[in-house]
Amino acid sequence: MAGDYLLNASLIVMAMMVIYFLRRPRFTKSESWQATLTPLSSIIGSGFLIMAPLLASVVGPLTPFAVIAIVILAYTIGTVIRFNIQHVEPRMIEGSLCVMTRQIEVLGNVALCLAYMVAVAFYLSLLSSFLLNYLEIQNIAAERLLTSVVIAFIAIVGYIKGLGGLEKLESVSMTIQLAIVGALLLGLFIYGFNFVSSDVALELNYQEREWTTQLRIMAGALLVVQGFETSRFLGTKYDPEVRVNTMRRAQIISGVLYVLAVIALLPVIQHLDLVHVKLANIVQVTGLVAVVLPVMLIAAAIMSQFSAAVADTGGAGGLLYQNTNSRFSTELSYVVISIAAIILVWSTDLLHIITLASQAFAIYYFLQTVLALNFCYKDCVPGKRMTIWMRLLFMMLAILLLAVVFFAIPAE
């Protein structure tokens, strides 16, 4: 009993230490850290808690290898975005790109706007699922209704006052989110150490599938590591070099956190029903690690999903405004985005939304890859083109992303 109290106290202290550390002037006044925090929080908020049960329900004991592959894929896609920030974006601002390159960029922005619509539905559906599951309310209609209410709230505030007031919550929520991730990892490592010491075998009871089906389901998990592309749209605050370096840093930090968390969560999620996976149950099962964890995680889940939805609503509204030649005001754009998200929430379930969002972001990333390749052949002087190896990498990546678009399926 004393050990349980000590563990719970240790996790709370850990979270408070991270908050204190991240709220120091060295970080709050650091341009580099602030530029890192936006993509980092977005990547982690995309699905830090759901990655382990989602992958374990598909590939079982191969989950560590699956998460490493997804993280590497995401980092490679990030290479494309970083190339475009460094090379395409300055020429776009100058207006010196060929017509085709400009058209691909506009098409990519439209695709990203649609991806954000789906992502808003995903984030807030996950928020509702986590909260209602924690309250032991198992009702899909209630989940969809709560999601719709939150989306409507964001739309109303965005229409009346803009999203400035809501965005002030983001910095605080990001810090709290990272603090709770730190506490979670500490608790999981202690639990994992005790599990390994007990010599109990790890048993993941998952549904066995054909390897092709497993790959198609894993392709639908791309959304979980999405968020690094937000660095592309921070140009009004930070120069290209800062955004490139901080995006790379955010991907490395988040990638390490994802791999560590997924591996450390395996002894915990073996207690879940991985045949009929319900992602929100991951919050409750962390109570096996420490009594305080479910409460901390539900707070982190709510704050991270809400802030991510706010950010994506704002991003989608801005993109819709820009790409409709100002036919929609940004305020009206928020409403249009929210209506589309509500329709999606009532049309399909959470696992399908995850796959739809992954496919939508895969379209955007594919177009970013095409943009980079087209720039190389149409806008670069021959001596300054990307290396042949980079061109081959980008071509392979484009093919892989198209496969995600056409073949990704949800876990059932």
Image: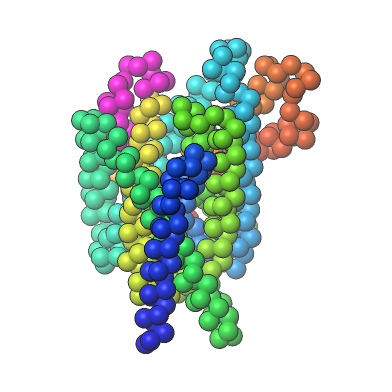
Q: Quick check: is 84 in the magenta stretch?
A: no
Quarter of the figure that contains the N terminus: bottom left
Residue 379 at what x, y percent from top left?
67, 16
Which of the 4 quarters of the picture holds residue 286?
bottom left
Residue 271 at what x, y percent from top left?
45, 74
**Which residue is at the front of the view, 3 or 251?**
3
Residue 80 at what x, y percent from top left?
62, 34
Q: Residue at x 54, y 57 (%)?
A: 258
**Which residue is at the front of the view, 4 or 148?**
4
Q: Residue at x 20, y 30 (%)?
A: 160
Residue 46 visible, this angle: no
Quarter of the figure that contains the C terminus: bottom left
Q: Residue at x 27, y 38 (%)?
A: 165
**Which residue is at the front of the view, 210 or 379?**
379
Magenta stretch bounds: 321-341
Q: Relative to 109, say whether 22 is above or below.
A: below
Residue 128 at what x, y percent from top left?
30, 54
Q: Residue at x 49, y 39 (%)?
A: 31
Which of the 4 quarters of the picture holds residue 326?
top left
Q: Main secondary structure of the magenta part?
A: helix
Q: Quick check: is 332 in the magenta stretch?
A: yes
Residue 79 visible, this angle: yes
- Say whether residue 373 is left or right of residue 315: right
